[in-house]
Amino acid sequence: MLSVLSALGAGFLKGLSYIGELSELHMRTLIHLFRGAVERKTTIAQMSHVGVSSLPIVVVTMLFSGMVMSYHIADQALMLGAGAYIGWMVAETMARELGPALTAIVVAARAGSSMAAELGTMKVTEQIDALRTMATDPVQYLVVPRYLAGMIMVPMLALIGGLIGVLGGFVIADTTAGMTAAAYFNSIRANLELWTIAAGIIKAVFFGVIIAVIGCHQGLYTEKASEEVGRATTRAVVYAIMLIYIANLALTMVLFP
């Protein structure tokens, strides 16, 4: 019994320590941002890496997700006599949940893991220590550009992914339910609220911050052993996805009371 309690206590303390490290890294990043200490070239390169390079997999993911969603919605809507609302229901689902959440998960798996691996390799090879020796703050030089890239590019990817998902939904709605383009898109225009789209973008901003902070944290706090880089990369993806789901619930309750 005591061993179980001891293990639970150790796990709880480890969790608090992790949250504290994330909070400290986030605050240091925000301080550099407020001071305008931004490496512009590095930031642009990271925006390309996070956004442009992730676009193909986001497009494929959202296209087929929209198709599957439309297939199920069309089936149920026709049974209930609500076929005229298929387009709106697909767009509503994409804007509220699937667009931001699925995009963030894809970016976490691709770009978040890359951040952890890159910074972890720099930590193991003592490049980060070399930056400190040259009086360069690793948070300013390495974390801030990735933070900005995640915060800016994930919402853009979510918006594009949502549009692709809606178009994929139309293909299935046209094929299975015989819905015309006019009927499909008119139902979206008549029922989809602007706030729903804005709320999805707000969610994506938070998700982008989560991906960047966790990915950079795992890289910066990697132990100096080559095998630890792979473990840090795995943790970055797992922790980011878990926090994305938790944040998604909290933001949904706040944005859609």
Image (cartoon, rainbow, N blue to C red):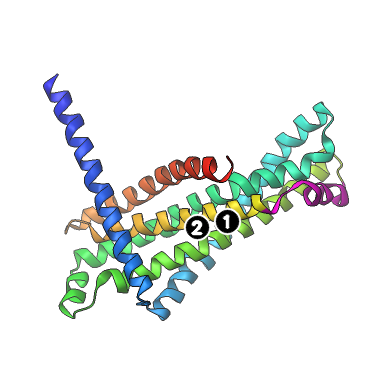
Provide residue 256's location: percent of width, then percent of height.
59, 42
Assess whether mark 1 and mark 2 are in contact (beta carbons under 8 angstroms): yes
Residue type highlighted by circle 1: Ile
Residue at 38% x, 56% y: name it. Answer: 113
Give the prevailing secondary structure in the magenta stretch. helix
Q: Secondary structure at mark 1?
A: helix
**Front in this rendered view, residue 67 or 146:** 146
Q: Secondary structure at mark 2?
A: helix
**Front in this rendered view, residue 196 or 137:** 196
**Front in this rendered view, residue 37 or 82:** 37
Range covered by the magenta-colored residues = 180-194
Residue at 82% x, 33% y: name it. Answer: 82
Residue type highlighted by circle 2: Val
Magenta stretch encompasses residue 225: no
Q: Is residue 132 visible?
A: yes
Provide residue 106's location: percent of width, then percent of height.
50, 52
Which residue matches tag 1? 201
Which residue matches tag 2? 205
- Extreme residue toward the front, this view: 257
Q: Quadrant of the C terminus?
A: top right
Provide residue 255's location: percent of width, then percent of height.
56, 46
Residue at 65% x, 49% y: name it. Answer: 196
How many residues crowd around disc 2 within 10 Å: few (fewer than 14), some, or many (20 or more)?
A: many
Left or right of 67 in this view: 238:
left
* Above/below status of 148 relative to 250: below
Provide residue 228's location: percent of width, then percent of height.
22, 53
How many residues crowd around disc 1 within 10 Å: few (fewer than 14), some, or many (20 or more)?
A: many
Left or right of 148 in this view: 8:
left
